[in-house]
Image: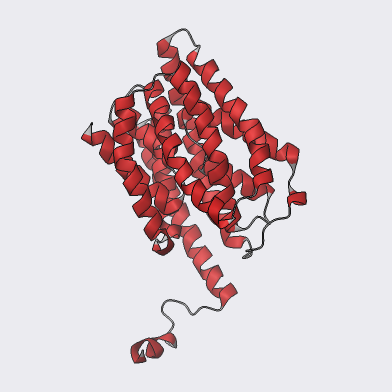
Amino acid sequence: MDPRITLAGALVGFVVGLTGMGGGALLTPILVLFLGIDPLTAVSSDLVAAMVMKPVGGAVHMRRGTVNYRLVGWLMLGSIPAAFGAVIVLTRVADPASTSNIIKTAIGVALLLASCALIAKSMLSAHRPANDQPMPASDVKPLATLAVGIFGGTVVGLTSVGSGSLMIVLLLLIYPRLSGKQLVGTDLVQAVPLVGSAAVAHLLFGDVKLAITGSLLIGSLPAVYLGAKISSRAPDNLIRPVLAVVLVASGLKLLKVPNEAVAITLLALAIALFTVLRIGGKARQVLTGEPPDDDPVAEPEHQNG
């Protein structure tokens, strides 16, 4: 067991349990950038570890009936062969150095897409009405859903990134009537065969290191459970922007962007996110009738209570 890898697994597992996103998007760059693990080995080992973790959350939602199985079916039809094929194409590159560069570039682009997806999900969720009713099966769009599955499967097979962050935002865009519970449940369940397909392909053709996978699972499994237990009380509107900034930084570094440009980009992003959060908070107060934080009318009631 490598304690550094176990610690990384625990950190990322806690974030995943807290937010439902960021597994491969955080863990793979940590393994590559900070622990010096070969990119192909990092992707392969990360996916095999995720194959063990994903069914836990999916099983909970299946028992609660918050899974749209028709959506899962169309997503699987596209994602499973796409993920498997992407791994074969990636691992058949003759030059190992070229393979490493391809993976780093692909992960960098995927991380930037994932960070945009996190921000987009927060904005979309803030403006969509509350809805606890299951979406009718007749509302499923087969071709659009199949395309999402193919795209997501390809990205996951190449980088281990996107089974949560990218796919859940694409589903939000296509199915605005899908309830929040169904959205998360459907995404978790479809991610099980998707990650499983990519993991099996990496076991056959990739470079899985069981010592790395085992160290990741020792840290991540209890951390995922702990994060999920407290997720209902976590300040999600703060966690996701922070996660987005981390993903942008990791993506830019993997794309070999100079440090000065990375710093300027992160500063601009932080300012933009702070502004959006402030505006979103004020808009939510107007829409819900909540008093502002410094409303003097609310103070006496607080003191009397």
The C terminus: image quadrant? bottom left
In the rendered image, residue 291, in percent from the top left (x then y), is placed at 49, 80
Depth check, front residue: 152 or 283: 152
Position of 222 with respect to 89 (left or right) is left
In the rendered image, is residue 146 in sight? Answer: yes
Answer with the quarter of the image where residue 303 lies.
Answer: bottom left
Depth check, front residue: 96 or 131: 131
**Residue at the location (48% across, 60% down)?**
277
In the rendered image, residue 116, in percent from the top left (x then y), is placed at 52, 44
**Furthest-right residue in view?**
138
So how many labels did they put on this image? 0
In the rendered image, residue 114, in percent from the top left (x then y), is placed at 50, 40
In the rendered image, is residue 257 in sight? Answer: no
In the rendered image, residue 93, in percent from the top left (x then y), is placed at 49, 11
Q: Is residue 196 above or below residue 248?
A: above
The N terminus: image quadrant? top left
Answer with the quarter of the image where residue 189 lies.
Answer: top right
**Residue at the location (53% across, 73% down)?**
285
Colour approach in the figure = secondary structure
Depth check, front residue: 27 or 204: 204
**Furthest-top residue in view?**
94
**Furthest-front residue in view?**
63
**Residue at the location (43% across, 62% down)?**
232
**Residue at the location (54% across, 54% down)?**
63
